[in-house]
Each structure stands twice: as C-alpha cells, then as structure tokens.
Image: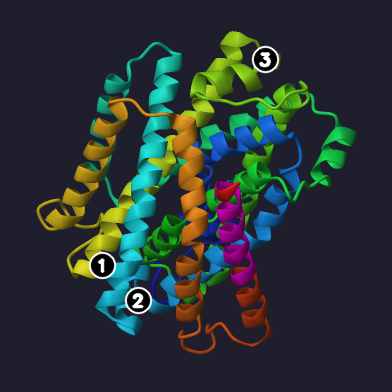
C-alpha cells in the first residue's frame, strides 16, 4: 500500500479518513479472534454455567488490547514479522521452537474453523465434503488473485456477519438482575468451571493473533506516524470481539442456563436450535448460520495466512501477498497445503464441540511461551517506543497473571 510510509498520509483532510485507511489489521484479527471455536466455547459456557463466566469476557478486553498493542508496536517500529524478530534476537533455534508452537495452534484453529463451516453446511443440508470443497477452492482463489488490501476487505466484510449475535442476544430477552447476580457468582473450586475459564482465556488470546497482526501492519507498510490510529484500530476490535463473545454467552445462558440442569452441546445444529428459539426456527437458524460463517471464514483466512507468512519468515523466503505465486512458491504452497489438508480431515468427520473447546485450552497452555517472547521483544525496541517504566511493570504483571492463570485453570480442569 503506497503512501503510508515516510510522511504518513498528508493528502487526507480528516482524521477519520486517515483512520479508515489505516484501520484493518486490528479489526480483522479481532473478528478472527471471535472464531468458530470461540463462539462454541462461549455457548458452552452459557449453557453449563449461566452468566458465571460473563464478567471474564469484560475483564479480558484490556488484557487483549495490551497484548495486541505490543504486536502493533513491534511491527510498525521494526518493520519485521514476529518470527523474523525472534530469529534476529534469539537465534534460529528459538525461532523454530516459536514457529512450532504457532503451527500447532494454527492446525488446531484451522480444524476448528473448517469444522464450524461444515456444521453450518449440515444445518442447511449441504454435505461436509461439498462445503469443504467450496471453502478451500474459494479461499485459495482469493489468495492467488488478490492483494493484501483486497484480502483485508474481504475478511472484514465476512467478519461483519458476526454482529448478528448482538441481535440474537437481545431477542433472547435476558434478565438484567439474573445477569448481574450470575456474573458475580464464581465457583472457583469446580474443575469444569476452571476448564471452561481456561478455554475462554485461550479463546481470546491466541498465539496466531500475535504473529498475524505484526505481519499485517508490516505488509500494510504502516509507520510510526500511523501508530496512534493503529492502536485505536486494535482497541475498537478488542471491544467488538468481546461484546460478541458476551452476546453468545448471554443468549445461551438465557435459553439454556436458566432451564435448570446444565446443557451439553455436541454440534453446531444443537447450538443453533438452543440459542435461537426467540427468533423462530427459520430466522434463528439463518442468523446463527450467517454469524458462524462470518466468524469461521475470517479466522480461516487469518490463520492460514499466519502459518504461511511465519514459516516464510523463518525460512528466509518471500512471504507476502504482494508477490505473485511464482515469486513466492513456499508462501502460497504452505497456504494451499494447510487449507487442503485441513479440509480433507474435516470432511472425514470430527466432533466439533470437543475439538473446539480443546483447542482453546491448548492455546491457554501455550500462552507463557507466546507472551514471554512478546514481552522480551518489546523490551528490545529502540527508544522512545521501547516497553519500559511503570507500563512495563503493568504489562509484565498482566502477562504473568494471564499466562499463569490460563495454565493453572487448564491443568486443574483437565485433572478434575
């Protein structure tokens, strides 16, 4: 994208126009954050524990912003991707270890997203193999023929369908008093509660988000003049993604959590039928399907691009959508193989809910490694953008507590 380096955007007359041009990486990665697995995790949380995990959704907003703001700062100031910076400061061995954790998270996420899309297809009578064929072919064509900006716009457009969950939550007619009481009732000693708490933390702060947003601001050629707008882009996205998560949880809690016995949801079809009764069967199924499609598609785009970009960074080969397929064969090859292999696996049949919640718990277990590198890299930035002083203390406390509690909750939940 031309005109973003150097003097920034001198030809734009308003700050809103400037923001609209710079915004994108933060909104896209946050819409991808509310992916199929996250929606399923939020629905399970509301179904099994009512509103008891609602407060956590709100508390995670500033934590999510703090983490992703560091990736924005690293990408804009250094002009390099996350894997490339780890290799520069810590060597190839640590870079490959970091990429190994990323690939693990990306594979789990891809399977979860594509399973979500297959589940939506089954709701409308479309077999899983046909849904996978359409998705894999469509997203491959998008990457091979589009630029970064066109892919970003497509991702934001499909991700906007997630906003239908706000309507779903409103139509569920939750009781405010019950929401407030439930949100403040926290059963700390219940293993299943801790397991879902870890899943929610893992659903919000995912390893691939760090790698994607840093690479995206680099590929978009943002400079330090764009840093403030990029931060607002990230802050807005953090609020939007957690509001959507809260809405899914509220809808499930209002329809299932108040029903008496905790409910277990084993498929996308069950979730759709459970949380959309107030909209009518046809309308509810359609809206839930649109929201799930938006969530899963934007996440699939982000996760697949992240794996291809980061492996390209560590391999030292071209790894950007600005190159044609013949100029960056490794990048496009990894992108294509990841999509096709995951699509084939999903077409063979998999338990979506168990897989999705398990993937989020795995993300929570990977947090110490991912957030640790993020903090250490931010401490190596040149002044005045280096993470230092009182804010550095706040960040290290947030990183330590979030990663530590995520691992504790995950292990306690599994052990229980």
The residue drawn where x is 53% and y is 63% is 68
10 Å neighbourhood of mark 1: few (<14), some, or many (≥20)?
A: many
Q: Are marks 3 and 1 in contact (CB under 8 Å)?
A: no
Q: Nearer the viewer, residue 240 or 10?
A: 240
Q: Which is nearer the N-term, disc 1 or disc 2?
A: 2
The residue drawn where x is 39% and y is 52% is 105
Residue located beneath label 1 in the image: 313
Secondary structure at badge 1 equals helix
Q: Is residue 173 magenta?
A: no
Secondary structure at badge 2 equals helix
Q: Does residue 103 lie above or below 280 as drawn?
A: below
Q: Is residue 136 left or right of residue 55?
A: left
Q: Residue furthest right?
A: 177
Residue located beneath label 2 in the image: 85
Residue located beneath label 3 in the image: 277
The residue drawn where x is 35% and y is 83% is 89
Magenta highlight range: 400-414
Q: Main secondary structure of the magenta part?
A: helix
Q: Nearer the viewer, residue 53 or 135?
A: 53
Quarter of the figure with the N terminus: bottom left
Q: CA distance from mark 2 to mark 3?
A: 49 Å
């Amino acid at each position: 994208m031309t005109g973003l380096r150097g003097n920034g955007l001198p030809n734009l007359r308003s700050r809103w126009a400037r923001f609209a041009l710079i915004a994108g990486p933060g909104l896209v990665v946050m819409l991808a954050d509310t992916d199929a697995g996250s929606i399923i995790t939020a629905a399970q949380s509301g179904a099994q524990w009512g509103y008891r995990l609602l407060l956590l959704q709100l508390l995670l907003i500033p934590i999510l912003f703090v983490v992703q703001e560091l990736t924005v700062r690293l990408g804009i100031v250094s002009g390099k991707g996350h894997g490339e910076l780890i290799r520069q400061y810590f060597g190839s061995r640590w870079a490959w270890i970091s990429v190994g954790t990323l690939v693990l998270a990306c594979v789990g996420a891809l399977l979860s997203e594509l399973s979500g899309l297959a589940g939506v297809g089954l709701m409308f009578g479309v077999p899983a193999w046909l849904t996978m064929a359409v998705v894999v072919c469509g997203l491959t064509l998008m990457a091979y023929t589009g630029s970064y900006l066109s892919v970003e716009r497509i991702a934001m457009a499909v991700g906007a369908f997630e906003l239908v969950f706000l309507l779903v939550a409103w139509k569920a007619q939750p009781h405010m008093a019950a929401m407030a009481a439930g949100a403040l009732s926290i059963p700390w000693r219940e293993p299943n509660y801790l397991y879902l708490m870890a899943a929610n933390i893992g659903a919000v702060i995912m390893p691939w988000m760090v790698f994607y947003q840093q690479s995206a601001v680099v590929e978009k050629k943002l400079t330090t003049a764009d840093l403030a707008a990029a931060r607002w882009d990230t802050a807005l996205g953090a609020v939007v993604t957690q509001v959507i998560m809260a809405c899914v949880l509220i809808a499930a809690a209002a329809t299932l959590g108040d029903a008496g016995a905790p409910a277990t949801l084993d498929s996308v079809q069950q979730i759709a039928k459970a949380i959309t009764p107030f909209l009518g069967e046809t309308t509810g199924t359609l809206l839930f399907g649109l929201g799930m499609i938006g969530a899963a598609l934007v996440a699939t785009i982000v996760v697949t691009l992240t794996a291809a970009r980061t492996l390209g960074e560590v391999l030292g080969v071209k790894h950007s959508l600005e190159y044609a397929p013949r100029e960056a064969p490794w990048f496009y090859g990894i992108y294509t193989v990841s999509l096709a292999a995951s699509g084939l696996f999903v077409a063979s049949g998999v338990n979506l809910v168990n897989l999705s919640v398990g993937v989020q718990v795995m993300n929570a277990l990977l947090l110490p490694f991912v957030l640790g590198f993020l903090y250490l890299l931010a401490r190596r930035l040149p002044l005045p953008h280096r993470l230092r002083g009182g804010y550095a203390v706040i960040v290290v406390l947030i990183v330590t507590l979030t990663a530590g509690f995520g691992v504790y909750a995950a292990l306690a939940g599994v052990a229980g």
